[in-house]
Amino acid sequence: MSYKNFPMVPRVIFGRGSFNQLNDILEPKRLNSKAPFIFLVDDVFKNNAWLTSRIPLAYDDRIIYISAAEEPKTSQVDELVEDIILTTKERPSGIIGIGGGTLLDLAKAVSIMLTNEGEAKDYQGWDLVKNEAVYHVGIPTISGTGAEVSRTTVLTGPEKKLGINSDYTPFDQVVLDSELTQDVPKEQWFYTGMDCYIHCIESLEGSYLNAFSQSYGEKAFDLCKEIFLDNNLSEVESQEKLMMASWHGGMSIAYSQVGVAHAMSYGLAYLLGTKHGIGNCIVFDHLEEFYPEGVKLFKEMKAKHNIKLPQGICADLTDADFDIMIKVSLGMAPLWENALGKNWKNIMTPEKLKSLYQKM
């Protein structure tokens, strides 16, 4: 038996206001005055001086504002890398992602592609990256995706939606400042929090489960219940606990995998551009057959926070559209095996999967 030797984020700082220490963290990592730090920042913060005025810029450092309205694409990564190469005198000292899962995944992918030849789509898969990435830092401004701690960066490519899963993907440094999550809209807070909750359910009920994944998954699950069901936390406590739930939920799949909801939401994202958090919620709502207790609890959380999910998003799709989604989804073999076991192909046939999509 050969076990995976997974890397973890080597440095993390936690605490409200820790974002103020960013200069102290970055400056020792500056290679020289010609090797800038590039900050990839969610464009919702473009006119938000409370955050942007604290980004420590020096020499040729720059901020690139990026919209998170769409899921990150391999073509977008290639464009960013080309832009950075053409506008910097030397390879950057580091890439810093500030935002939700989209920005964190882009920061990870850009840092990898600055040191590896070819296009981002060439690295979609497991352990294809040859060279160590540029120093990269993740600063989440919303909690739930686990992108701050995972060893993947999920990208939509020309043929598939799949992560760059590698030992070089995890951040070198993460800054967990729950104060940065204070203005997240309620629906977004719920959808992204549920991404974390669904990580837990899929990990804890999967065939890949082991004590490592279980310990993280159970902690994240308990935190999610405390935040989204018990509801007797102060706003600050809720923000801090969701930040830790996201971390633990991300860790729970390091030695495990996600399952049916993620595999299906990848299909929705690829064809319809459905954002990851809401896509997971739309799918999970219909998965009683696979996760009866988890879905029951999810529906309770949904009702408690008065969340109305979009209906009928697959209503007008053609057979060809369904075939595209089914192909993308069934391409996620490790997810299906974790969810349904080694004989998953006999259980989740294309016809069965189509009938599930048709409910949405």
Image (spheres, rainbow, N blue to C red):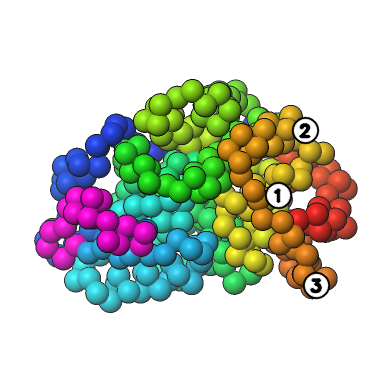
* Mark before the other along the chain sequence, 2 or 3: 2
The disc at residue 292 is: 2
In this image, 165 relative to 85: left or right? Answer: right
Dot 3 falls on a residue whose secondary structure is: loop
The disc at residue 274 is: none
Q: Amino acid at mark 2?
A: Pro
Residue at (73% x, 40% y) in the render: 339
Asked whether residue 114 is drawn in magenta, I would say no
Asked whether the viewer can see residue 285, the reply is yes
Q: Amino acid at mark 1?
A: Val
Rendering coords of residue 302 (x, y %): 63, 39
In this image, 61 relative to 343: left or right? Answer: left
The image quadrant of residue 108 is: bottom left
Asked whether residue 52 is drawn in magenta, I would say yes
In the depicted view, which residue is nearer to us: 319 or 53?
53
Vertical relation: 110 (above or below) 78: above
Quadrant in which the N terminus appears: top right
Residue denoted by label 1: 283
Dot 2 falls on a residue whose secondary structure is: helix
Residue at (72% x, 44% y) in the render: 285
- Magenta-colored span: 43-61
Residue denoted by label 3: 318
Dot 1 falls on a residue whose secondary structure is: helix
Residue at (86% x, 46% y) in the render: 347
Badge 1: residue crowd in 10 Å (few <14, some 14–19, many ≥20): many
In this image, 337 relative to 216: left or right? Answer: right
